[in-house]
Image (spheres, coloured by chain):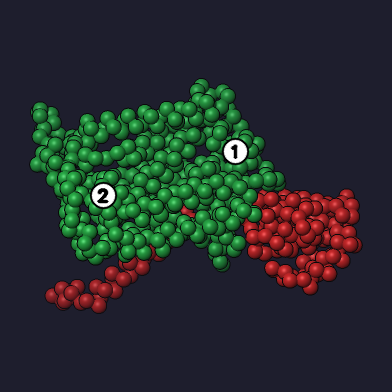
Chain colours: A red, B green
Amino acid sequence: MTDTNDNNDPSRRDFLYITTAVFGATGAASVAWPLIDQLNPSASVSALSSIEADISSIPEGGSLKVAWRGKPIFIRRRTKEEIEMAEKEDSVDLPHPEKDLDRVKNKEWLVVVGVCTHLGCIPIADSGDFGGWFCPCHGSHYDISGRIRKGPAPTNLEIPPYEFVNENIIKIG
Amino acid sequence: MNHDYQYTPKNGFSKWLDKRLPLMRFADENLLSFPTPKNLNYFYTFGFILTMCLVTQIITGIVLAMHYVPNTSLAFDSIEHIMRDVNYGWLIRYTHSNGASMFFLAVFIHMFRGLYYGSYKEPREIIWILGVVIFLLMIITGFMGYVLPWGQMSFWGATVITNLVATIPVVGEPVLTLLLGGYSVDNPTLNRFFSLHYLLPFVIFGVVILHIWALHVTGNNNPTGIEVKDSKDTISFHPYYTVKDLFAYVVFLIMFCYFIFYNPNILGHPDNYIEADPMLTPAHIVPEWYLLPFYAILRAVPDKLMGVLLMFGSIIVLFFLPWLDTMKVKSARYRPLYKIFFLLFVIFCLLLGYLGAKPPEGIYLFLSRVSTIYYFAFFLVIMPILSRIEKPSPMPIGISNPAINNEVFDSGGGTTGTPSYAMDSK
């Protein structure tokens, strides 16, 4: 019987072992992935990832706080002095160097995610040592361009993706 | 009770059962006649107290879950519903919330006890490591439980702590989104925290069984740190330690009841009676008191990632304790230098707890840094050095033999020589 010889062939047996193991591992992974991915944002959460805000009522020097993905977005209409100050301070020694011009699409409007880059608290407007925001949790100071100036936060306030739909409407997300 | 004692089934039914499922034999050998060192003091009752804490939390928790609703728009109201409308709901909730504090109080004493009497040393490394695993699980469970009432501290505590994950380079952000089920702490987060908060206590229960199993393989350590030699050194667990444990538990319950009935909110934060507002951060975010020392370590470091690493490191370092302190003499009773450094360690831990509740500036920040340095130096520098240079004070030959054991102390340091008492086992 040649069959018995074939069954004892080590390379053939090894091949079977390895293919079985690979099939088993692939199967286990394909079962595990849905169980992991269900933790990610659901379709309904992702659907809320774009909003429009009416900015026509904001006076110069005023600001608006809107919710986007459960986080506040600060929309600040800056005064001429504030813009000047932000641009002048481009040259100082910044922990996270960024030009003010690179952080805005229109100098008058600063749009940032109002979440401290340290541990996620919401900074308070018009306070702190640099004329911008101050985070009460662990003492981070941001300037009027939303740049980190002092404190434990590692980076500047994040800029969300946004565009001006027209003069009065900003679309965020 | 002597060690030759064997369980013998007394009647027909127990004989029949013993051949099929030796449940009675197991209970007898592990609970009733289990030989226990005769010199255990009241610090050794906290194992039992902790078991009772876990049982209390599980029972009150199961009941609370029958009335609580894990949904951001209903959670806060359902807690007030439990407090005002559910029969005895206030009692059950106050027992559960203060029970968490009592659990941590007891576990801190239990761990300091182990640290003082060297209970983590050979041959009890696994008991200690399992204990640290339980402690980690307790922290995670306690943190998730604090989120469920959906008050301001729940929400912002959850935001700050989950954001620690985002500090991990590269994968931090996606992992954070995966953890939260969204881009910020919201309903999906509350739902999964509720699910896990219900699950983890049973995982803790499982690890506790392993912890006790390992304890029953090596037997208890004791205040002298000298291993049990023969049956003269031990007494049966029942009735001697069952009664001692129960008495200690009753005293512990009196304190527990003080908090439940007379001061149920003193350990919590008043802001948690304000419903969560994702658009408004409270002026000071303070975690539960039992996490304050770790919070102080986090804030002591100016660098975000380093702060997170040190905070987790402060618990991870405990896993390596058996190999950092290699001194053969276990108990601090016979280690004059270690005793001083240990007391300093306790003081610095308490100080860290105090500093965790203070704003991280000025003298508070300075003291946090000093305390953090001592915390790590105690394990990573002081322990290994003391293991080499400390000369133990005279110690007895055995638990039942107060005569001084001379052969041990001529060798100087603890790592040299092999003192016979350390190698003996019962």
What residue is at 50 percent from the left and 23 percent from the top?
Answer: B88
Q: Is residue B151 above or below residue B365?
A: above
Q: Amino acid at mark 1?
A: His
What residue is at 63 percent from the left and 50 percent from the top?
Answer: B359
**Which of the labelled discs sits on residue B38, or is there none?**
none
Q: Is residue B390 visible?
A: yes
Helix, strand or loop at label 1? It is: loop
Q: How many neighbours does mark 1 have within 10 angstroms: few (below 14), some (14-19), or many (20 or more)?
A: some
Q: Quadrant of the N terminus of chain B?
A: top left
Chain that bears disc 1 = B
The image quarter in which residue B246 lies? top left
What residue is at 53 percent from the left and 57 percent from the top?
Answer: B370
Horizontal and vertical percent for residue B345?
44, 52
Of residues B166 and A169, the one drawn nearer to the viewer in this rendering: B166
Chain that bears disc 2 = B
Horizontal and vertical percent for residue B418?
20, 62
Q: How many neighbours does mark 2 have within 10 angstroms: few (below 14), some (14-19), or many (20 or more)?
A: many
Q: Amino acid at mark 2?
A: Gly
**Which of the labelled discs sits on residue B225, or is there none?**
2
Callout in the foreground (2, 1): 2
Residue A66 falls left or right of residue A18: right
What residue is at 80 percent from the left and 58 percent from the top?
Answer: A131
Of residues B169 and B286, the one drawn nearer to the viewer in this rendering: B286
Horizontal and vertical percent for residue B426?
16, 49
Identify the residue at the far top of this view.
B87
The residues tagged by marks 2 and 1 sit, at their Cα atoms, a distance apart of 41 Å
Q: Is residue B276 above or below residue B345?
A: above
**Which of the labelled discs sits on residue B269, or is there none?**
1
Q: Is residue B107 above or below residue A103?
A: above
Horizontal and vertical percent for residue B276?
64, 41
Q: Earlier in the sequence, mark 2 or mark 1?
A: 2
